[in-house]
Image (cartoon, helix red, strand yellow):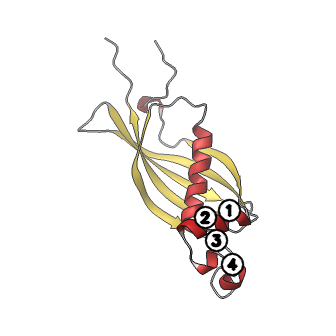
Amino acid sequence: MSDGLKYFEDLLVGTKASFGRYEVTREEVVEFATKYDPQPFHLSDEAAAQTYFGRLSASGWHTAAMAMRMAVENMRGQRSASLGSPGIDELRWLKPVYPGDTLRCETELLDKRVSQSRPEMGITKGRTTVFNQRDEAVMTFVANGLIRTRPREN
């Protein structure tokens, strides 16, 4: 009998997905930077003009937070046996993100395996790429996930 959840066994390596739409605003860039990453190039165009960025740009950590928001929105309505994540690998900020940019995500499941110490859960590895409206990759990371294996019927 199916409970409607997506389990480890339902995941196929190589599966790709595209989702999200996030409009980056100047107000949010400055608000995030003021609170979490108050480097001058995240706070004003004048300070950023003297840097690689050339103008006000979003913090990389803000870009990661925007990607997480898109991922959570994508997961809503999907019934998954997810158990969270032990972390990410290979986080790269490839291009600046500017106010006025519109971001989206693409994911690919790279690998999966059953945990040796906890066979009731599987471990996944997937690459996320965040693109701007010009289809330029602005950030990539590899996420590690935990997901329940399908319960055995008695």
Circle 3 crowding by C-alpha within 10 Å: few under 14, some 14–19, many from 20: many
Q: How many marks?
A: 4
Q: Residue at x 31, y 30 (%)?
A: 120
* Residue at disc 2, secondary structure: helix
* Residue picked out by circle 1: 28
Which residue in the protein does label 4 denote? Answer: 44
Q: Residues within 10 Å of mark 4 (few under 14, many from 20)?
A: some
Q: The disc labelled 1 sits on which kind of residue?
A: Glu
Q: Quadrant of residue 63?
A: bottom right
Name which residue type carries label 4: Ser
Lower sequence index among marks 1 and 3: 1
Real-space Cα separation, disc 4 to disc 1, in angstroms: 13 Å
**First in sequence: mark 2 or mark 4?**
2
Q: Is residue 26 visible?
A: yes
- Which of the two labelled residues, at mark 2 and mark 3, occupies the earlier sequence position? 2
Residue corresponding to mark 2? 32
Whole-percent x, y for residue 117 in the image: 23, 38
Residue 132 placement (x, y as % from top left): 69, 61
Task: Please name the residue shown 50% across and 31% down the image.
Answer: 80
Q: Secondary structure at mark 1?
A: helix
CB-based contact (under 8 Å), mark 2 and mark 3: no
C-alpha gap between disc 1 and disc 3: 15 Å
Q: Could you tell me residue 34's position as x and y percent?
A: 60, 70
Q: Residue at x 57, y 77 (%)?
A: 39
Dot 1 alpha-carbon crowd within 10 angstroms: few under 14, some 14 to 19, many 20 or more: few
SS at mark 3? loop
Find out whether the residues at labels 1 and 2 contact each other: C-beta distance under 8 Å: yes
Q: What amino acid type should be assigned to the residue bearing mark 2? A: Phe
Specify the label residue 96 is tagged with: 3
Q: Amino acid at mark 3?
A: Pro
